Image (tube, rainbow, N blue to C red):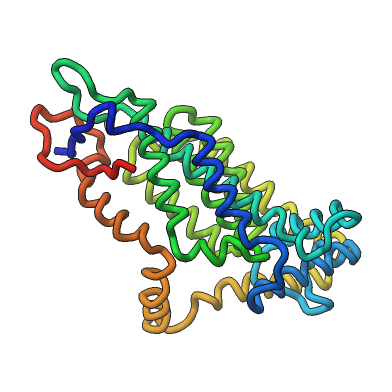
Amino acid sequence: MRPVVRLTASATSALPRWLLLTICIVYAFFGLFGRDPWKNEDAAGFGVMWTMANGSAHDWLLPNLVGKYMTEDGPLGYWLGAGAIRALAPWVDASNASRVFTGLLFCAACAFVWYAAYLLGRRAEVQPFKYAFGGEPEPRDYGRTLADGALLILLACFGLAERGHETTPQLAQFFGIAMLVYGLVRMIDKPIQGALIWGLALGFVALASSPVLVGALLLGTLAMALIVREARSRWLLLAGLPVALVLSVAWPIAAIAAFPDDAVWYLNQWVHVSLSSFAGPPGSVAAYALKNLPLFTWPAWPLALWAWFSWSGLGGAPPRPRHHSRFSPVFVL
């Protein structure tokens, strides 16, 4: 038996669009410009972008910091920053220009999170209890309420306060993962469109991160397809996966074709660094996760656990029970 929410229409007053947009823009761009890099990763990311913007095709295809190869992540995040430096060079200094896409990617990721929650919140199986004489919220209003809450919880996460304003490839990864989640949700109602979005997102993540993260997202997609029957679609294999493969191999093929010897060494290091970062003793990896994840994901993780247990019967989407539960698993924000 899945829980049923008792909620009135007056309790689902969504935030005005302009206010929600203003919150995202202020959060994304406040403290982003007019400052020096905060720490080594921030400075190194800017250095790679500056090297690309003032360098040759070799620098664009094989990211490096004044000759030192940077093999931890793919080049997509660096490409965006370097492109902004080149495009805005006459008017904006390189340090500020390199962070333009940081703010834009953050806002785009927030939009994907909002729309993913909105689409889920409109579905029939999650709608509130219908009263005999009406008064329950419309699916659209209920979806907006859940989406507003999801976005505000995301913005409240401690880990985004710093990482969301750094000149690193991690914002491109965050954007790609948010887009991937939206694609999976969109696929429930529009399989082809959702699968294509999922494939584009996975390709973007491959270009911006590492093979391990791409493998983790593939395993996560497979697990979700096995658990949630609405997410099973042949279009993931027929449309989404080919798009992801084309995007993923475009950069390695171009690099090998242009600079065979350097590219082979670089790509080997890229794979090796990706695997070795997760190859430590299980105890140390677990200790690192226990130390950092609760802090960086606060307050999302306790709310996620609470929602998981509160909505544990929703996975199969059974028919609505006749009796409603006493408590409502919804935050009204």
> Which residue, as the protein is rendered here, is positioned at the far top?
133
Classify residue 141 by image quadrant: top left
Write the residue at 74% across / 72% down. 266
Residue 317 drawn at (x, y percent): 25, 34
Q: Relative to 161, is 141 on the left or the right? A: left
Q: Quadrant of the C terminus?
A: top left
Residue 326, picture quadrant = top left
Give the residue drawn at x 36%, y 39%.
146
The answer to whether residue 182 is left or right of residue 244 is: left
Up the image or down, 316 lies above or below 23; here it is above
Residue 321, compared with residue 298, is above or below; it is: above
Examine the rendered structure and indicate whether residue 58 appears above or below residue 2: below
Residue 293 position by quadrant: bottom left
- Across the whole image, how many numbered discs are drawn on residues? 0
Q: Position of residue 92 (x, y in %)?
A: 83, 57
Q: Residue at x 59, y 52 (%)?
A: 106
Q: Position of residue 221 (x, y in %)?
A: 44, 49
- Nearer to us in this view, 321 or 130: 130
Q: Residue at x 26, y 42 (%)?
A: 330
Q: Quadrant of the N terminus?
A: top left
- Residue 59's place in the image compared with 198, above or below, is below
Q: Report whether 77 appears left or right of 122.
A: right
Q: Nearer the viewer, residue 136 or 45?
A: 136
Q: Position of residue 132 (x, y in %)?
A: 14, 17
- The reply, left or right, for residue 230 in relation to residue 32 is left
